[in-house]
Amino acid sequence: MRTFLFVVHFALCIMIMVVVLMQRRKQGGFGGAFGGMGTQADYGQWQRFTGLTKLTIVLFVLMMLTSLILTLVIA
């Protein structure tokens, strides 16, 4: 069980790295990340996310869940 979770977790980490590197660069930089650029219309709209962004979010959530489960299994 633990070995299987390690393999799944490692695969998720690799997939996240690949998906993040495939994404197009945004022009906002860190200013856009902390609310310095953009309007209220940019926030809270799932439709505005690209497919790669949605995939990144899903993979990240799965990686966090496997991290939590691994922590509980090992402890």
Image (tube, helix red, strand yellow):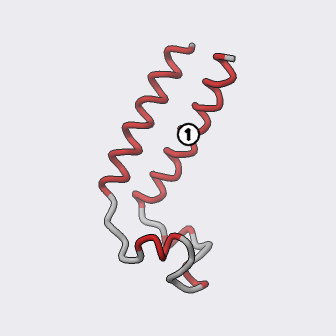
Say which of 27 and 23 sits in front: 27
Q: Position of residue 6 (x, y in %)?
A: 49, 22
The residue depicted at 52 percent of the width and 48 percent of the height is: 58
Q: Position of residue 31 (x, y in %)?
A: 48, 76
The residue depicted at 53 percent of the width and 22 percent of the height is: 5
Please identify the quadrant where the C terminus is shown: top right
The residue depicted at 55 percent of the width and 72 percent of the height is: 34
Looking at the picture, does residue 22 appear above or below residue 5?
below
Q: Which quadrant of the view contains residue 46?
A: bottom right
Q: Position of residue 69 (x, y in %)?
A: 64, 27
Looking at the picture, does residue 65 appear above or below residue 46?
above
What amino acid does circle 1 point to?
A: Leu
Say which of 70 and 41 sits in front: 70
Give the SS element for disc 1.
helix
Q: Give neighbour class at mark 1: few <14, some 14-19, many 20+ (Cα, 10 Å).
A: some
Q: Which residue is mark 1?
A: 62
Is residue 51 found left or right of 2 in the rendered image? left
Please identify the quadrant where the N terminus is shown: top right
Q: Position of residue 21 (x, y in %)?
A: 31, 53
The residue depicted at 33 percent of the width and 67 percent of the height is: 25
